[in-house]
Amino acid sequence: MAGMAAAIRLALFDRKVLLLERHNVPGGLNSYYAQAGRRFDVGLHAVTNYAPPRARGAPLNKIFRQLRIGREEFALSEQKGSRIVFPGFDLSFANDLESFRAEIESVFPQCIDGFDRLLAIMDDFDSLSSHPPDLSARQVLRETLAEPALEDALMCPLCYYGSARENDMEFAQFVIMFNALFREGFGRPLEGVRRVIRVLRNKYRSLGGERRLKTGVKRIVARDGKATSLELDDGQVIEATHVVSTIGWVETQRLCSDREQDAGKEEIGRLSFVETITVTDLQPADLGWEDTIVFFNTEESFVYERPEDLVDLRSGVICFPNNYLYPDGENLDEGFFRVTALADFNGWASLDESIYKEEKAKWFERLHKVSMQVLPETDEARLNRHVIATDMFTPRTIQHFTGKLGGAVYGAPDKRRDGATHLSNLHLCGTDQGFLGIVGAMLSGISIVNQRILSPS
Amino acid sequence: MDNEKIKQIVLDIIAEIAPDEDLSDVKPDQRLRDQLDLDSMDFLDIVMELRKQHGIEVPEDDYMKLESLDSCAEYLLPKFPQQAV
């Protein structure tokens, strides 16, 4: 997604661009696949950063403008409403900070002044700076809220939607994510991620950009501190004045001829996920499930780290792509619900193929069971009669299809905000630059190209 | 070419890159950034369109000379060919 945005931006400025994608489907971490004639989105639970037209400075509106795409083309519909579900309390939110604030005031009245102080601190913080101060979000929350349960409840959704760091995040990242989820919120095109990908593809094509799928880069040839050419998987050599990489920082280094093939081992992200997908011939609302997204934690404290077991069942995210305010009462033909939880890449990667399948089936059931405890009660026998398909992906699946080492969808814990690498004309954008989510990815591609190629001062 | 025509050219470009902005009441003597939701990314596009549409190059050091419609006109006028466009 970051790469497509970067390519459009360059093509708009009349640069000659070649967009290379190793997979047979574009989109990278936000993509889709087909199974038995049914298409499944990966990555996209929601387009975060939903902003109405004319919202000043909103990242979403910046993207429409910078890519010269009409906002109607993404056809985003707003969420119905989401919840953070913790032992003993839950917090509802929709695309409206005021109602979330009121919710916090009613559940944690003693924290509301602290919460307002937190909002004020965030207002004054330049989260998009290319060199933000390294400040712990946990520390700021502890000092303002002084309530571990609320601190955990705010961290849970933000971690799940974009922290590459275990149990904490940089405060700059926290501010970006808080705005993306709570100030702005969730939207989704009825068609899902395919809609966004198609709009980007058509835009790029209309500008005369060239694209090759199923074409990976084998090596970035480096000489005298510059990337001089790319060697493709098929042996072809491409010369370029600039190279923009969205595959991740460690992954990019390992392609460079001046770096070792196992460079950056200690920088690989440790956080990966499993996701179960259940398809029904009923709408989720018919089962009593009206939430758009549910972030849950079932323990006293919220733990966000690589689990010792294959999957950490203590917390997760449940999403219902059906539960958006689609126009004219339209909806997806089938009901979908997806449950995401932390998983251990090494554990999944080391399983033999036959055991891998067994473990998948076993953890699917366990995670499903947890989600039944978290969601409003439903008639499970009835649900089971209406399930028409299931699938599950693991950290192993993620690494296989996206090339993200360790299946770390949020990349390396330390971000490279300025997009710089050790080679002067090799630029990094996407996940490891640090803006996350679909909107973040596109903004990353746009801003790195703007700063480093279109106006290098 | 005169100052008024140049202001219109700049407004037309802004309308193109920022179709969601209301340009009906832009004060020529005030900074564009103060009146409209424009940031440095948008100024890159204004400069690009000046080059694409009118063959005018604005070096990065001069971007600040585009801050208001009046300053745009003053700075760009000598750059336009003198015969009417």
Image: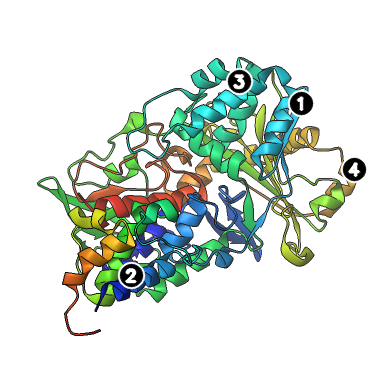
Query: Residue A313 appears at what percent x and percent y?
Result: 67, 29
The reply to whether residue A354 is in sight is no
Label 1 crowd bin: few (<14), some (14–19), many (20+), radius 10 Å: few
Q: Position of residue B54 (x, y in %)?
A: 25, 76
- Which residue is at a point 69% across and 53% down the rendered structure image? A321
> Label 1 is found on which chain of the structure?
A
* Category of crowding for the residue at label 4, using alpha-carbon neighbours closer than 10 angstroms: few (below 14), some (14–19), many (at least 20): few
Whichever of callouts 4 and 3 sits on the residue coming sooner in the sequence is 3
Q: CA separation, marks 4 and 3?
A: 41 Å
Dot 4 and dot 2 residues touching (CB under 8 Å)? no
* Rendering quarter of residue B63: bottom left
| Residue at point 81%, 45% (across, down) | A289
Cα distance between the residues tagged 3 and 1: 14 Å
Tell me how far mark 1 sits from mark 2, CA to CA: 53 Å
**Chain for disc number 4:** A
Q: What amino acid is at disc 2?
A: Lys
Q: Look at mark 1 in the image and give the residue it sits on.
A: A106
Q: Secondary structure at mark 4?
A: loop
Mark 2 residue element: helix
Residue beneath disc 2: B7
> Disc 3 residue type?
Gly
Give the number of the disc on residue A379.
Answer: 4
Mark 1: amino acid: Ser
Q: Amino acid at mark 4?
A: Asp
Q: Where does the N terminus of chain A fall, quadrant-wise?
A: bottom left
Q: In the picture shown, does residue A348 fall above or below A193?
A: above
Q: Secondary structure at mark 1?
A: helix
Q: Could you tell me if the residues under marks 4 and 3 are in contact, i.e. CB atoms within 8 Å?
A: no
- Cα–Cα span, label 2 and label 3: 49 Å
A389 relative to A251 in the view: left or right: right
